[in-house]
Amino acid sequence: MSVDSYLRRWNLTPDGAAIRTPSSDLMPVRWQGRPAMLKVARSAEEQRGNDLMVWLEGEGAARVYRHGGAALLMERLESAPDLAALALGGQDDAATRILCGAAAGVHRDRPQPPATLLSLTWWFEALAESAELGGVFRQAWGTAQRLLADQRDVRPLHGDLHHGNVLRSPERGWLVIDPKGLTGERTFDFANLLCNPTLAHALTPGRLERQSALIAREAGLDRARLLAWVGAYAALSAAWHLEDAQMEQARQSLAVSALAHSLR
């Protein structure tokens, strides 16, 4: 069903410009007098994320008001203050602490996770294929294989936790949106934080050392294991960038992977 179909079905009033991404259609709306966001998934990945949002039941995440088929009607959160701007503006530590707090909300123990969640082993398929290129790819795939074979504290994961996917509710604080819907080791969910808010910022001298130590303290993680996941994930991200012919982003992602491996 289209966005227009859900507007009629759920009696929604458009309240801003439509947004189209490669995998979903979004529309700011009003529902029962309150601001909301309608999201209609156009990929299996986005539908897995929808399933996770429903399961979270608004704990650590935007509330889901209605759901059905490929669509979610969610609490509309504020885009300001912007965590990326906060980090790039000299308050990196403050942004990181907020992100770790949001992750804790997602990682709370809850019963009966969705059966649709994708395992990390499948998520790393693109890195396995890129390992034949050698160099950092091969090194990172070796790291990923070791981590995937010995996962710890396995639970549902956001899968794409970064500065743009944590927004603020004036009443409820910082909450996640737009998960990928994965399952695997909790530490993995923090790897993407260290590749953001930009790859150039991630490669700032001393930044990976400082922020990995901060995340390990805030989230109760083993820092060496966190850096191992960063090394694996950054190379996976590079593989995805290569698939999209984004050569500079792939180069920078591989540089993050190599740096993480050097710090372990």
Image (cartoon, grey):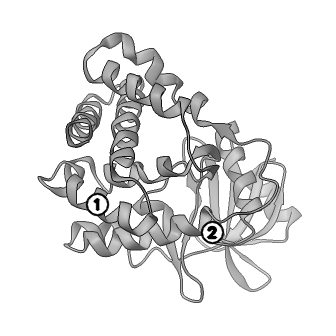
Of discs 2 and 1, which sits in the foreground?
A: 1
Q: Residue at x 34, y 53 (%)?
A: 223
Mark 1 is surrounded, within 10 Å at the Cα level, by few (under 14), some (14 to 19) or many (20 or more) other residues, namely: some
Tell me the residue at 70%/37% (across/down): 44
Residue 43 can be seen, yes or no: no
Residue type at numbered disc 2: Ala
Inter-mark Cα distance, 2 to 1: 25 Å
Q: Tell me if mark 2 has few (under 14), some (14-19) or many (20+) residues whose alpha carbon lies within 10 angstroms of its own.
A: many
204 to 167, vertically: above or below: above
Mark 2 element type: loop
Q: Where, by quadrant of the figure, is residue 178 drawn?
A: bottom right
Using the image as rendered, state which of residue 50 and residue 207 is in the foreground. Answer: 207
Residue 90, by quadrant, is bottom left
Q: Earlier in the sequence, mark 2 or mark 1?
A: 2
> What is the quadrant of residue 247 in the picture?
top left
Residue beneath label 1, please? 213
Q: Is residue 247 left or right of residue 132?
A: left
Farthest top residue in view: 132
The C terminus lies in which quarter of the figure? top left
Q: Amino acid at mark 1?
A: Ala
Give the residue displayed 48% in from the left and 72% down from the top.
101
x%, y% of residue 154?
62, 47
What label sits on residue 61 in the rendered view? Answer: 2
| Image x and y of residue 37, in percent | 66, 68
Where in the figure is residue 182, as x and y percent of width and height? 63, 44
